[in-house]
Amino acid sequence: MTRALILLFLILPAPAVACTGQTACTLPEGSYHVREPDDWDGVTPLPVLLHFHGWQRQGTLIVTHARIAGHTRRRGVLLVAPNGPGRSWDWWNKDTANVALGRAVLEDIKSRYPVDPESIYVSGYSWGGAMAWRFVCEDGADVAALLSISGTLDQAEDCATAPREVRHVHGLVDTVMEYPTGPGGDEMYPVALWREALGCGEVRKEGAWKAVDWLTLTRFVWDRCGQGRVTLDQHPGGHFIPHGWIGWQLDQLMGREPRYP
């Protein structure tokens, strides 16, 4: 090796340590995992799905999960999965440090990847669904959509920010995080907070739909809002991530014909 090449290697910055899949990216606030989409060219700006895992899980599961990563990797979406401290999330109070972790993860991703700033999506399942609500409630001004599964906040919360769109799905016989029926048996109550925050009017029943043959969902839509849009999907099952649900939402948000998987 020539003296000139040696000097060049000495002055060039060291390459960033790869942290994808089961190898965690570490930050002062915590850690996270990332799954790149299939066939990404390394240049095109990426939509991002920041997903908060369920109780006693970690991001290692999320980046291999067929009903999460199985959809993002086929749609050109970068999947990002923070690790909750103690395999859990503290979403009960506004001042939780877990919001700062979520923000630090997003900012770190922006330093590593070309992120499409208009296509930042936040999702979560169960305990992580409630954490996703908490994140966008406190620091969601740049979030294009919340995709929440079987987890909410108290509908009386006063949120500092809101995403541009909210999509929530919940099973009617969920016994883990029960379907949050409102006063008088109001089945539209699970998204009451966001309907008020976005200034939504009357509901429109869009009707039955399904991504897979074995699960039919019923969709309710609020699209006459002062800003944004809210959808609520009900299904007759319990506490699980519906097959195809995340991919279906991403397709619609990105202006594509929904498909499975």
Image: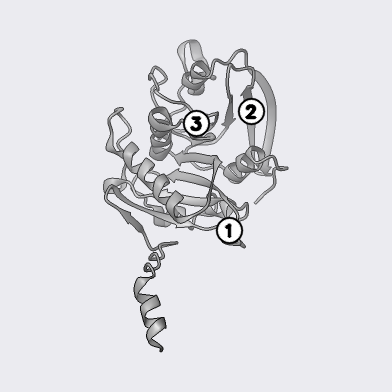
Query: Gap between marks 1 and 2, in whole Å?
Result: 36 Å
Amino acid of disc 1:
Val
In the displayed image of the protein, which residue is found farthest to the bottom?
Answer: 1
Residue reaching furthest right?
257
Q: Secondary structure at mark 3?
A: loop
Measured in 3D between alpha carbons, the distance from the residue under mark 2 to the one under mark 3, in whole angstroms, is: 17 Å
Mark number displayed over residue 219: 2
* 74 relative position to 112: left or right: right
Q: CA distance from mark 1 to mark 3?
A: 44 Å
Identity of the amino acid at label 2?
Arg
**Disc 1 and disc 2 in contact, CB within 8 angstroms:** no
The N terminus lies in which quarter of the figure?
bottom left
Residue in view at x 58 percent, y 56 percent = 73
**Going by the image, does 32 lie left or right of 165?**
left
**Residue placed at 60% from the left, 60% from the top?**
40
- Determine whether label 1 and label 3 are within 8 Å by CB: no
Which numbered disc covers residue 223?
Answer: none
The label nearer to you, 1 versus 2, is 1
Which label's residue is closer to the chain start, 1 or 2? 1
Q: Position of residue 101 (x, y in %)?
A: 33, 43
The quadrant holding residue 94 is top left
Q: Which residue is disc 1 drawn over?
A: 43
First in sequence: mark 1 vs mark 3: 1
Q: Please tell me which of labels 2 and 3 falls first in the chain.
A: 3
Using a 10 Å C-alpha cutoff, classify the residue at mark 1 as few (fewer than 14 neighbours), some (14 to 19) or many (20 or more): few
Quarter of the view holding residue 250: top right
Q: In the rendered image, which residue does mark 3 sit on? A: 173
